[in-house]
Image: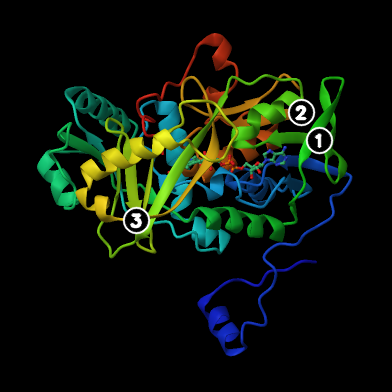
Amino acid sequence: MFGNKRYSLGKLIRESRDYHTGWQQAWPDPTPKKHYDVVIIGGGGHGLGTAYYLAKEHGITNVAVIEKGWLGGGNTGRNTTIIRSNYLQPESIALYDHSVKLFETLSEELNYNIMFSSRSVLHLAHTMHDLHEVGRRGHSIWANGVDSELLSPAQVKAKVPTINLNTRFPIMGGLLQRRAGNARHDAVAWGYARAAAELGVDIIQQCAVTGFTVTNNKISAIETTKGNISAGRVGAVVAGHAGVVAGMAGLRLPLESFPLQAFVSEPLKPILDCVVMSGTVHVYASQSDKGELVIGAGSDHYVSYAQRGSFNLVEEIVHPMVELFPFVSRLRMLRQWAGIVDVTIDRSPILSKTPVDNFYVNCGWGTGGFKATPGSANVFAASLAGDDMHPFAKPFSLERFATGAYVDEGAASGVAH
Ligand SMILES: Cc1cc2nc3c(=O)[nH]c(=O)nc-3n(C[C@H](O)[C@H](O)[C@H](O)COP(=O)(O)OP(=O)(O)OC[C@H]3O[C@@H](n4cnc5c(N)ncnc54)[C@H](O)[C@@H]3O)c2cc1C
């Protein structure tokens, strides 16, 4: 039996004394079994978290997570880690705030330091329209019992002394959520993987799902590069590749996949202690624990599966960043990368059963699903376990695209991260 010793300060001291010879592999590398009660496709934070909650909260441990590459190698390890719950619609606030609350205690729950930092997130308003939008959203958030504050330009300057208020579109105020912030993205995937493996979940890396055999409207075999596997229930949690995997079951999801890119600068001394976002000039930034500025903006203008991001976006991101923070013109950028984000028409996710009886999808998080990782995983696990969508998930079903009951988050997710 694979067993992990608890991580603790005492363990660290003992290992330092013993030249770090006693650490165990964080999770094993099993050969896939022929059958599982539940198979989760996709080893990002949402998929690994789903497996963890299935085992922890529902006692379903005969579970496999199948990942075509390495854990967190998709959007989980490529995102800019902004966590917040200040969305417009009550359905979204319930789901995203469930997630923020789980983030607050996740390090203790998983015995893994995910470095959650509630350093606050500030959305800037540059026009009267922006002020109305953040005002309306702020009131909606309060009405749903979640913290939110409207700031004047002077309060914005006091909160972020390095900001330039007199940009092309002068800053007229802001919307602040103090409980919002960041966490270490890889650690979220690794923490869930380690805790799920400890409870008996098989984590199978370097194993791509290549097709499904559908018999009597059920997935009877999952075809993978390591052989066929059968499962009672199958959950696809593959973000930008949701359309491709659902297509293997004969389904067409209402999604488009776009590249979304980000940069980090060379490290600086601490100068920015909150996340700053602007949907109007369209950029956002935070400072990592290493001191780098983490910078991002909108997705590419064209659908694509190329994980690069196009050149014109580089200028579109750097230009407003230099306007807001003029000192950035003297900074060197260290790295640039992109992920593939899966975007719906109402900018809300899809958590749903599908027309194929035992096939469920968790996708459509677009540019903003890292913040939802624990909440999404928690309600998706409950939905898979009970064969009925969790109340927080129900408004996000596929049916809304037929009935028109959209959960419109176009404005709250203007710079969605
Ligand atoms: C540049 C960038 C910045 C972002 N910034 C933020 C942010 O600040 N805040 C925020 O909340 N969100 C942000 N996001 C969005 C966020 O990253 C995603 O919504 C979230 O990480 C999705 O997690 P996931 O577990 O669903 O998907 P992923 O982490 O992408 O995991 C899906 C996994 O499925 C695997 N897979 C795909 N196809 C197959 C197959 N056929 N067989 C087996 N495995 C397969 C992939 O390899 C991948 O590892 C950002 C995204 C990007 C790209």
Q: Under 8 Å from ligand 1: the CB of mark 1?
A: no
User: Could you say where residue 169 lies in the image, as x and y percent from the top left?
Assistant: 17, 31
User: Could you say where residue 369 lies in the image, as x and y percent from the top left?
Assistant: 50, 38
Q: Earlier in the sequence, mark 1 or mark 3?
A: 1
Q: How many marks?
A: 3
Q: Earlier in the sequence, mark 2 or mark 1?
A: 1
The mark found on residue 232 in the picture is 1
Q: Residues within 10 Å of mark 1 (few under 14, many from 20)?
A: some
Spatial CA distance of label 2 from label 1 is: 7 Å
**In the current view of this chain or complex, which residue is farthest to the front?**
311
Regarding mark 2 in the picture, which secondary structure is present there? loop
User: Could you say where residue 333 lies in the image, as x and y percent from the top left?
Assistant: 38, 53
Q: For the residue marked with disc 2, what is the amino acid? A: Asn
Residue at the (64%, 33%) spot, across then down: 241
* Front tag of 1 and 3: 3
Answer yes or no: do the residues labelled 2 and 1 have beta carbons within 8 Å? yes
The mark found on residue 221 in the picture is none
Answer yes or no: do the residues labelled 1 and 3 have beta carbons within 8 Å? no
Can residue 297 be seen here?
Answer: no
**In the current view of this chain or complex, which residue is farthest to the top?**
403
Regarding mark 1 in the picture, which secondary structure is present there? strand
The mark found on residue 332 in the picture is 3
Can residue 49 be seen here?
Answer: yes
Q: For the residue marked with disc 3, what is the amino acid? A: Arg
Spatial CA distance of label 2 from label 3 is: 50 Å
The mark found on residue 358 in the picture is 2
Relative to the observer, which residue lies in front, 7 or 252?
A: 252
Spatial CA distance of label 1 from label 3 is: 51 Å
